[in-house]
Image: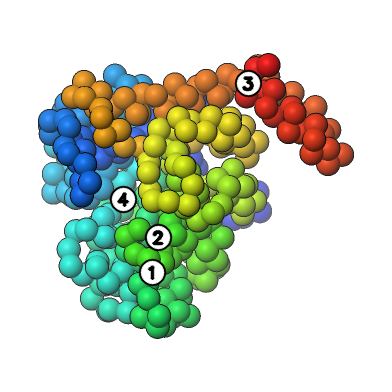
Amino acid sequence: MAFKKNSAGQWVPELPEYQLGEAFGAGVWNIGPGGGRFAPAMRPVLSLEETLAHLKTSGLTHVEFHDTEAEPADAEKIMTAVNNAGLKVSMCTANLFKRGPEFANGNFGSEVEHSRKESVRRTQEYIRTGIEIFNAGVYVYWNSSNGFGGPLMVNYKDMFQRTADGLNEVVAWMLKEYGPERALPIAIEPKPNEPVSWGVPADCGEALAIIGLMEPEYQPFVGTNLETCHSLMAGKRYAAELGLAAAAGKVFYVHLNGGTGLKFDEDLAFGDNDFGVAVETVYTLQEVGYNGVVAIDVQPLNTDTPDQQAASLGRSIRNFKRAQQICTERIDAAKLQALRSTANRAELSEYFVSIVSGK
Ligand SMILES: [Mn+2]
């Protein structure tokens, strides 16, 4: 994983190329005991080896880490366990939200200088780990605490520019240390709220706008990691968000899951709640030519038992493959495009439901 120059002389990421549906990734945080403010813990805490074994048997090929779960100092030992489990690291990400009190003020865009500096330092440290030890495919910057909580709590103009400047600083350092040939693609994962009331960037458009505020020479090294549930929370249609990122050449990675509307980050299994959305998502990934790892960011259900640690992940993969089979067997691309080009919305709706229902 790194960057190469295209025919126009621009740096573009060399994403790992798989057949869509061949490589699936998930975080070590996607299984575990559960529990929280409103739910009891239902499952035992697993060792790293047990976690990796569950991921492998559930159909995952790749694993993801926060620096809080896989500290840079432990990374070599953890990589041995990953190799032993027959997995690869597709993504790593620094925790810029819960790691310490400095991140309660936000991260790259914070008004507090110490928070900004720590964000850059932690990000650089984990990009180094991703390149030198994990051989990761992508580094994700989830906005998390970046944003604001209420009226005039930040200078809005400065907050957006500072977020871009933090990314500038990270990319400048990365290129100096490793050069474009070894640089780790950085994917911004937007989310409109939770943990902060107003997350920045909130959606794909804001993520692309922040990339547009970066120094032109650094922009090619930053793209997006769009998540289904985050898009829903922002009132957006996930597949359309994917289309926007693809039009800008910025689909560096994806996080699939499910939700039920303008609510909280439910992280439901992909396809469980709205299978039509799953079919649309898989078809859109095909249309935009996504060939990277399909990463799934879902949580177990509150009632899942100890032997169902990874049930949501396994079901997400099966739902993805079900949707993929439907796309292959039932969608006639030429017919779909003909209906689109005549703007026949009645026939388009009839066609889509017949595809999903098989009737
Ligand atoms: Mn989520």
> What amino acid is found at the position of numbered circle 3 in the picture?
Ser
Nearer the observer: mark 2 or 1; the answer is 2
> What amino acid is found at the position of numbered circle 1 in the picture?
Gly
- Give the residue number, with chain letter if any, for mark 4: 93
Q: Quadrant of residue 117?
A: bottom left
Nearer the observer: mark 3 or 1; the answer is 3
Q: Earlier in the sequence, mark 2 or mark 4?
A: 4
Check residue 193 in the rendering and tell me which mark sits there, or answer none.
2
- Give the residue number, with chain letter if any, for mark 3: 357
Q: Earlier in the sequence, mark 4 or mark 1?
A: 4
Instruction: Count neighbours of disc 3 (C-alpha within 10 A) and say few if under 14, some if 14 to 19, many if 20 or more.
Output: few
Instruction: Count neighbours of disc 1 (C-alpha within 10 A) and say few if under 14, some if 14 to 19, many if 20 or more.
Output: many
Residue 192 visible = yes
Pointer 4 with pointer 1, Cβ within 8 A: no
Nearer the observer: mark 4 or 3; the answer is 3
Instruction: Count neighbours of disc 4 (C-alpha within 10 A) and say few if under 14, some if 14 to 19, many if 20 or more.
Output: many
Pointer 4 with pointer 3, Cβ within 8 A: no
Pointer 3 with pointer 2, Cβ within 8 A: no
Q: Earlier in the sequence, mark 4 or mark 3?
A: 4
Most foreground residue, 33 or 159: 33
> What amino acid is found at the position of numbered circle 4 in the picture?
Thr
> What amino acid is found at the position of numbered circle 2 in the picture?
Asn
Check residue 147 in the rendering and tell me which mark sits there, or answer none.
1
